[in-house]
């Protein structure tokens, strides 16, 4: 498809935002109802926490399918199919009679939701070039942050008034609206690969992507920063419940971090008018590492009885993540115009697998409380620094190649 030079319309931006938020809504809306669901199913905290880990696993695996599939047969058809699966699985979650069925339904729900995660990023790369693409990412990523604030609040409201099962009925309604918006959009994929078999094309695409140090470095940073966020999301409901907070209080606790994420995202968008992402990235990563280090030190050296000593540094982490995401996603996908959905699928697969591991570990050791959460987050800080070292190496190689070409 020919690239669009104009800015996207408000309706298109709204569509991008809804697509980007689908997986996060399914993740965040039911968090305040963890304890209610546990009691209803008469199960353990670890199994309820596993429902989040299983969702992340489904998100990771599905993206490996949707990326290549949408590169080959088109974005819209694949996206509508994925949203339909999400809606049906959400109905199954709502009517689940036990924890086993609930976990299976959550896995299927994730397989549907991840279609939106992959494809909206690919459509941006399909339609827009350079600065426009970067600014679209910088516009949408902060909007994604609304889900950690609004979704738990809405989930807590629904759970309090209509029961926890109504949360998943609300997700069905959102899926139906999103499918209607999707059907009004034009196809953006080039669809010019019919001359080669699926196996041959996949081998070429994955080989091109996996040889890129630039892709690997930005992916590792993206995954590490996201894992820190999900470690907190998985552990914080149990930590706050142990401190005596109600489900409504837990929902409200996501508001400050959401504001912080939005500040980071739109602050990054403003700074990109003056500085390059290359210049901004090391400073933002320094803020991220300092935040997880402070949280770890506090949990080790003091007895925390309220959430505020942890929530305040976590808000600084949210600022860092809000600024990092647009930079590293745009950089990771920029070299793969011919297979943008495959690259986006692989990027998100790896990111989600790391989040799955972080969430699973926090769930498994939930009995140890806050220290489990902050230790996991501290480890992600070192992983992010390793990713940045790969980015630096890739930049040096690109500079050397440029010098050889001009010599």
Image (spheres, rainbow, N blue to C red):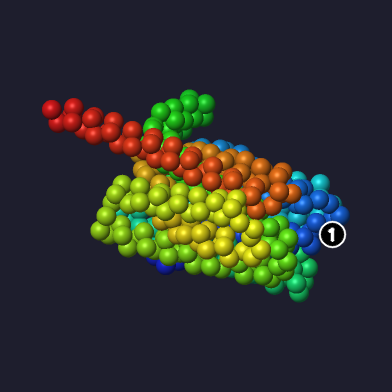
Instruction: Name the residue nearer the viewer: 68 or 382.
Output: 382
Point out the residue furthest to the left here.
Answer: 407
Q: Note whether residue 335 is visible.
A: yes
Task: Name the quadrant containing residue 30.
Answer: bottom right
Task: Name the quadrant containing residue 175.
Answer: bottom right
- Residue at the image position 69 percent from the left and 70 percent from the top: 248
- Residue at the image position 52 percent from the left and 43 percent from the top: 380
Image spot of residue 219 (x, y percent): 46, 40
241 relative position to 78: left or right: right
Relative to 367, does residue 313 appear above or below in the rendering? Answer: below
Image spot of residue 14 (x, y percent): 48, 64
Image spot of residue 223 (x, y percent): 51, 43
- Residue at the image position 51 percent from the left and 54 percent from the top: 294
Classify 10 Å Cα crowding around label 1: few (below 14), some (14-19), many (20 and above).
Answer: few
Point out the residue furthest to the bottom here.
Answer: 161
Instruction: Name the residue nearer the viewer: 290 or 45.
Output: 290
Instruction: Name the residue nearer the viewer: 79 or 404.
Output: 404
The C terminus: image quadrant: top left
Give the total of numbered labels.
1
Relative to 102, does residue 220 appear above or below in the rendering? Answer: above
Query: What residue sits right under mark 1 in the picture?
Result: 40
Q: Note whether residue 125 is visible.
A: no
368 relative position to 121: left or right: right
382 relative position to 163: left or right: left
319 relative position to 110: left or right: left
- Residue at the image position 81 percent from the left and 46 percent from the top: 100
Point out the residue furthest to the front here.
Answer: 301
> At numbered mark 1, what does the secondary structure look like: helix, strand or loop?
helix
Image spot of residue 309 (x, y percent): 57, 62
């Amino acid at each position: 498809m020919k690239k669009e030079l104009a800015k996207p319309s408000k309706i298109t931006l709204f569509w991008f935002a809804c697509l980007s938020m689908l997986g996060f809504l399914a993740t965040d809306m039911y968090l305040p109802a963890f304890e209610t669901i546990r009691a209803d199913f008469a199960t353990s905290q670890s199994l309820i926490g596993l429902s989040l880990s299983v969702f992340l696993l489904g998100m990771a695996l599905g993206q490996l399918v949707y990326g290549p599939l949408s590169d080959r047969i088109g974005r819209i058809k694949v996206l509508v199919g994925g949203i339909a699966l999400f809606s049906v699985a959400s109905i199954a979650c709502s009517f689940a009679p036990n924890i086993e069925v609930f976990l299976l339904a959550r896995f299927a729900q994730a397989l549907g939701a991840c279609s939106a995660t992959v494809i909206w990023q690919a459509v941006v790369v399909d339609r827009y070039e350079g600065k426009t693409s970067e600014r679209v990412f910088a516009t949408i990523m902060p909007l994604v942050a609304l889900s950690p604030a609004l979704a738990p609040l809405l989930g807590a409201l629904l759970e309090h008034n209509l029961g926890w099962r109504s949360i998943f009925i609300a997700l069905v309604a959102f899926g139906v609206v999103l499918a209607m918006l999707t059907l009004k959009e034009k196809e953006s994929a080039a669809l010019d690969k019919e001359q080669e078999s699926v196996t041959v094309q996949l081998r070429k695409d994955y080989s091109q992507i996996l040889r890129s140090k630039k892709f690997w470095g930005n992916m590792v940073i993206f995954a590490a920063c996201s894992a820190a966020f999900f470690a907190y999301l998985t552990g914080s409901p149990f930590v706050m419940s142990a401190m005596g907070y109600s489900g409504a209080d837990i929902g409200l606790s996501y508001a400050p971090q959401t504001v912080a994420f939005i500040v980071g995202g739109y602050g990054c968008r403003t700074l990109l008018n003056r500085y390059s992402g290359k210049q901004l990235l090391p400073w933002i990563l320094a803020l991220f590492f300092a935040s997880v280090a402070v949280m770890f030190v506090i949990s080790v050296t003091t007895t925390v009885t309220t959430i505020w000593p942890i929530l305040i540094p976590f808000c600084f982490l949210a600022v860092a993540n809000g600024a990092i995401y647009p930079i590293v996603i745009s950089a990771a996908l920029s070299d793969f115009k011919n297979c943008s959905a495959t690259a986006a699928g692989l990027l998100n697969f790896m990111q989600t697998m790391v989040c799955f591991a972080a969430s699973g570990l926090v769930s498994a050791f939930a009995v140890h409380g806050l220290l489990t959460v902050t230790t996991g987050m501290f480890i992600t800080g070192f992983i992010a620094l390793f990713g940045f070292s790969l980015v630096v190496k890739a930049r040096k190689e690109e500079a050397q190649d440029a010098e050889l070409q001009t010599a």
